Image (cartoon, grey):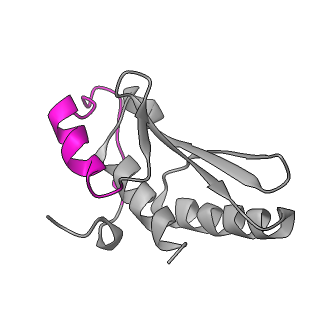
């Protein structure tokens, strides 16, 4: 299976079908720290950091990746040191390859 961190997000348009459950399961094996949610329409992950400054630095790095890839997650900083990220492709109302590419690139920030 290809390394998702080496792939680039491609624009999705309305009318493109979301990934099927079996494709989601295949991609999910490559980003096991992420939870599949909302009836296979989204993936999410929670991260915990030493302090607010570390959490904010992480969010800024995620933002840089999102801008480069043109694929933007929903991000929440809460409880001063926790970050929750949710990925889904808004244009198609579900998951696309892009969501798993972003998840893999976000995970790579922690290595």
Tell which of 31 and 71 is nearer to you.
31
Q: Is residue 110 left or right of residue 49?
A: left
Residue at 30% of width from left, 67% of height from top?
7
Q: Quadrant of residue 10?
A: bottom left
Q: Is residue 19 left or right of residue 81?
A: left
Among the 4 quarters of the image, the one containing residue 35: top left
Residue 20 visible in the picture: no
> Against 11, is 6 above or below?
below
Is 70 on the left-hand or right-hand side of 94? right
The answer to whether residue 38 of the structure is visible from this angle is yes
Quarter of the image for the N terminus: give it.
bottom left
Residue 19 sits in quarter? top left
Q: Position of residue 51 (x, y in %)?
A: 83, 65
Asked if the magenta segment contains residue 20, the reply would be yes
Residue at the spot x=50%, y=78% of the render? 111
> Would you say the magenta stretch is mainly helix, strand or loop?
loop
Q: Say if 79 sits above or below 109 in the image.
A: above
Seen as rendered, the residue at the extreme top is 39
* Residue segment shown in magenta: 9-31
Residue 31 placement (x, y as % from top left): 35, 56
Which is more toward the observer, 95 or 71? 95
Q: Is residue 18 above or below residue 52?
A: above
**x 74%, y 70%: residue:** 57
Residue 99: x percent and y percent?
40, 48
Q: How many marks?
A: 0
| In magenta stretch: residue 29 | yes
């Amino acid at each position: 299976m290809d390394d998702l961190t080496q792939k680039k997000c491609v624009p999705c348009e309305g009318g493109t079908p979301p990934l099927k459950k079996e494709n989601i399961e295949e991609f999910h094996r490559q980003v096991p720290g992420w939870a599949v949610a909302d009836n296979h329409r989204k993936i999410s992950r929670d991260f915990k950091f030493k302090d607010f400054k570390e959490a904010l630095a992480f969010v800024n790095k995620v933002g840089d990746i999102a801008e480069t890839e043109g694929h933007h997650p929903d991000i929440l900083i809460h409880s001063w040191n926790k970050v929750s990220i949710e990925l889904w492709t808004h244009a198609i109302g579900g998951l696309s390859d892009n969501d798993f590419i972003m998840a893999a690139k976000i995970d790579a920030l922690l290595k």
